[in-house]
Structures are given as structure tokens and as C-alpha cells.
Image (cartoon, rainbow, N blue to C red):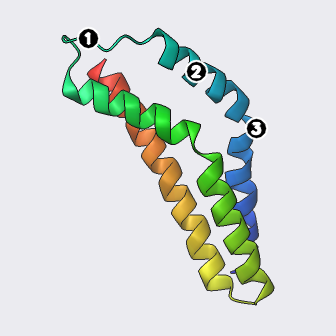
Amino acid sequence: MRVASITLICLTSAFLLLYPFVLLANVMSYAGYANSATTSLGLSIAMSGFLWSSTLYPLPYLAALIVSIIYLKRKNDKKALQWQIGLLAYIGIIIGFMIAWMIFE
């Protein structure tokens, strides 16, 4: 289980390599989007959900990383793995918002 936890830590940290580009695109999306009366509720929720969740990704990443490292040092590999799986679920939510945005667009 220790190997799986460390592998997931490396996998989830790989998403941080894309973060500067995602942040730049999100800032441009926030600046360019004018909330109008013709925008559907689904599109608004999907867009806002994607932009906010992807912009704030480093916060849950750091929380999961710190807690996982603490659990790994305490030899509690199962809890460390659960935190990393939770972070993968968060990435899944981001991808879900992105797909919903493409569908509603």
C-alpha cells in the first residue's frame, strides 16, 4: 500500500505541471465571460464549477499531500492511500465539470 500511496502522490502532482496554463486560461475565462440572461443555469453551474474547482486545485492537493505524508511517516499506509484516492475523486469532479461545460455549450 505504501507504493500505491507514493505512486498516487506522484500522479496527482503531475497535474500541477499543467496548473500555470490552466490558471491563465481560467483568468481569461473569468474576464471574458459576461453573465447574460440567455445563459442557461446548467451552463452557468458547469462553467463556474470547472473554473473554481480547477483554479483552487493546489489547495486540496497540498492538504492531501501533507496529511498523506504524516500518515506515511506514522506507518498508516491505508489512511494515506485514502487521502490520495480522495484527491483523485476531486480531479474526477473537475473533469466532470469540464465535460458538463462542453455538453451545455
Residue 74 in picture, x, y percent from top left: 76, 89
Residue drawn at 72 percent across, 68 percent down: 66
User: Do labels 3 and 1 touch, CB within 8 Å?
Assistant: no
In the image: residue 77, left or right of residue 37: right
| Residue kind at label 2, given as amino acid type | Val
What amino acid does circle 3 point to?
Leu
Residue identified by numbered label 1 = 36
Residue toward you, 4 or 93: 93
Indicate the secondary structure of the residue bearing disc 2: helix
Residue 76, quarter of picture: bottom right
Mark 2 nearby-residue class (10 Å; few <14, some 14–19, many ≥20): few
Q: CA distance from mark 2 to mark 3?
A: 17 Å
Placement of 72 over or under 17, stated as above or below: below
Question: To which residue does mark 2 refer?
Answer: 27
Report how far apart the C-alphas of labels 2 and 1 lie in the structure. Answer: 19 Å
Q: Which residue is mark 3?
A: 17
In x, y percent, where is residue 58? 65, 47
Task: Residue type at mark 1: give it.
Answer: Ser
Q: Please tell me whether mark 3 or mark 1 is closer to you in this view.
A: 1
Question: Mark 2, mark 3: which one is toward the viewer?
Answer: 2
Marks 2,1: beta carbons within 8 A: no
Q: CA distance from mark 3 to mark 1?
A: 34 Å
Residue 37 lies left or right of residue 89; in this view the side is left
Sequence-wise first label, 3 or 1: 3
